[in-house]
Image (cartoon, rainbow, N blue to C red):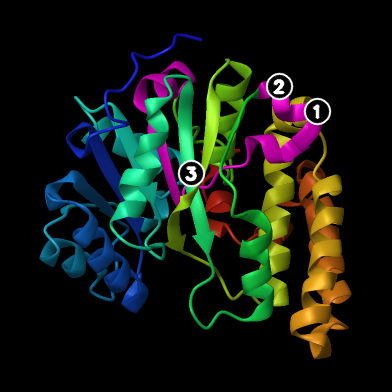
Amino acid sequence: MIVAPEARDGCGLDRVRIVVPVRNGGARWREAARALRAAVPDPSLVAVVDSRSTDGSDRAAVESGFELEQIDPGMFNHGGTRQWAIEQFCAGKEFAVFLTHDAILEGPESLRSLLAAFSDPAVGAAYGRQLPHRGAGPFEAHMILFNYGATSETRSLADAPRLGIKTAYISNSFAAYRLSALRACGGFPSHLILGEDTCVAVKMLLSGWKVRYCAKSQVRHSHAYTILQEAQRYFDFGVLHTQLSELIRNFGAAEGEGARFVASELRYFAANAPRLLPVVPVRNAAKYVSYRLGRSFERLPRGLCRRLSMTKVFWDTARQN
């Protein structure tokens, strides 16, 4: 690992570019844009990549003073689009921050707090805490509360025996990267169905970099998925874990973390929504079966994979496979 020069004050915003992919973000994107505008002194630091929104999301970006670039929605790719944005917008910058259009900053200080992680020259990537959207249902809320605890930590490859697959956890819904480390690891991949952030975290950890979780850097971000949508999402995770074999090989299988999730969910619902307890095993069974099907996607017909998947554009683009 080549260690970057130690930052003087964490990271000044003039050394940063913030990138937000948008597609029909609606009212939530407009709220997120307002929160982001309040957090940056210069709105031109924010680059919005809009996949030809039809709901005025592009206008909301322009009205906020953000730089706007539009792409064909059929060409959107979780990793490829973000890597294109790095090359398009980040010349001369040292750090890049990624947000999704439905992630709402919890106060202007969340952005600076996240960037302060880079005061440690060994940190290659950092991500913030996600909180459920206000009014979120119990399944939505528990998923976020389980994955994003209240304690910050810096993870290295040495933590793999203790944390397993969680060692490489990160989310581009609110994450920042040291661009020198990102480039040294090959940038964001375009061949994966999703999980470009996880792929980079794995490569960084294996190269000696560290990943920082910043619990005080917060966004509101959660999804009210139906059982079908959750099953589709977990099919995609299964596909990812087959594509990204170095994740399982170096950090262990996902099933152990899944078992801990189910135990946590049962406790949460017993305390907060006992009437929904019978639904918990049904949802988790659907997720597990879908995940296992995703792990075997190479043996399934392409059309079936598309139906089982949430990321349908992946299956529509032949060169991604």
Viewer can see residue 307:
no
Magenta stretch: includes residue 2 = no
Q: Main secondary structure of the magenta part?
A: helix
Residue at image mark 3: 127
> Mark 3 to mark 1: distance in Å?
21 Å
Of labels 2 and 3, earlier in sequence is 3
User: In terms of secondary structure, where does tag 2 sit?
Assistant: helix
Q: Which residue is drawn at 62% across and 72% down?
A: 141
Question: Which residues are drawn in magenta?
Answer: 157-186
Q: Is residue 278 left or right of residue 205?
A: right
Q: How many neighbours does mark 1 have within 10 angstroms: few (below 14), some (14-19), or many (20 or more)? A: few
Residue type indicated by callout 2? Ala
Residue at image mark 1: 161
Q: Which residue is drawn at 73% across and 66% down?
A: 231
Q: In which quarter of the image is the C terminus?
A: top right
Q: In which quarter of the image is residue 116?
A: top left
User: In terms of secondary structure, where does tag 3 sit?
Assistant: strand
Q: Which residue is drawn at 27% across and 72% down?
A: 30
Q: Is residue 198 left or right of residue 272?
A: left
Residue type indicated by callout 1? Pro
Q: Is residue 35 left or right of residue 105?
A: left
Magenta stretch: includes residue 183 = yes
Of labels 3 and 1, earlier in sequence is 3
Residue most extreme to the bottom: 275
Q: How many neighbours does mark 2 have within 10 angstroms: few (below 14), some (14-19), or many (20 or more)? A: few
Q: Residue at x 49, y 20 (%)?
A: 185
Task: Point out residue 40 in the picture as x, y percentages from the top left corner.
Answer: 19, 52
Q: Which of 130 and 188 is in front in this view?
A: 130
Task: Point out residue 230 in the picture as x, y percentages from the top left corner.
Answer: 69, 67
> Mark 1 to mark 2: distance in Å?
7 Å
Residue at image mark 2: 158
